[in-house]
Image: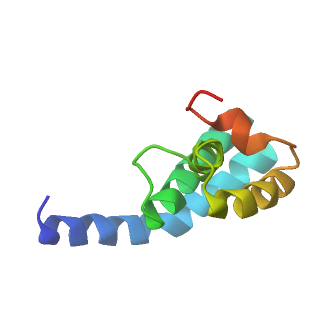
Amino acid sequence: MSRLKLLMVWALCTLASPILSIAMLCQAAFGSTDRALSMAVAQDECGNALFGGTRGETISTRTGNALIQGKRWAKIAAPCIDFLMMQKGHCLANATLPH
């Protein structure tokens, strides 16, 4: 994709972001929890892309896979993510590599 097209996509995402945040809040509070979760996963995948992750992969999955591979950063990040998600072993449960 050309840089110009990417800049156009960026502009559309920038315009849509506040609307999507409000929509997710409304879905979580009053609407479909499944839809709110899907929106949260999409934002998670965006955050993973920011740090160089694979397209379509969440931060938890990437961290769980890195934990299985013995990467030092994952040994620090996984307990933090598990705590935030209020689920012990969350990252490992979302890993796609064989344990």
In the rendered view, would you say 19 is above or below 78?
below
Which image quarter is the N terminus in? bottom left
Which image quarter is the C terminus in? top right
Residue 37, given in percent of the width and then of the height, sits at 67, 42
In the rendered view, would you say 96 is above or below 65?
above
Q: Is residue 84 visible?
A: yes
Side of 91 where 54 appears, left or right:
left
Q: Can residue 32 be seen in this view?
A: no
Residue sitting at x 50%, y 44%:
57
Residue sitting at x 50%, y 66%:
17
Residue sitting at x 51%, y 52%:
45
The front one of 74 and 60 is 74
Side of 85 where 6 appears, left or right:
left
Residue 85, given in percent of the width and then of the height, sits at 81, 50
In the rendered view, would you say 78 is above or below 36?
below
The front one of 56 and 37 is 56
The front one of 40 and 77 is 77
Res 33 quadrant in image: top right
The color scheme shown is rainbow
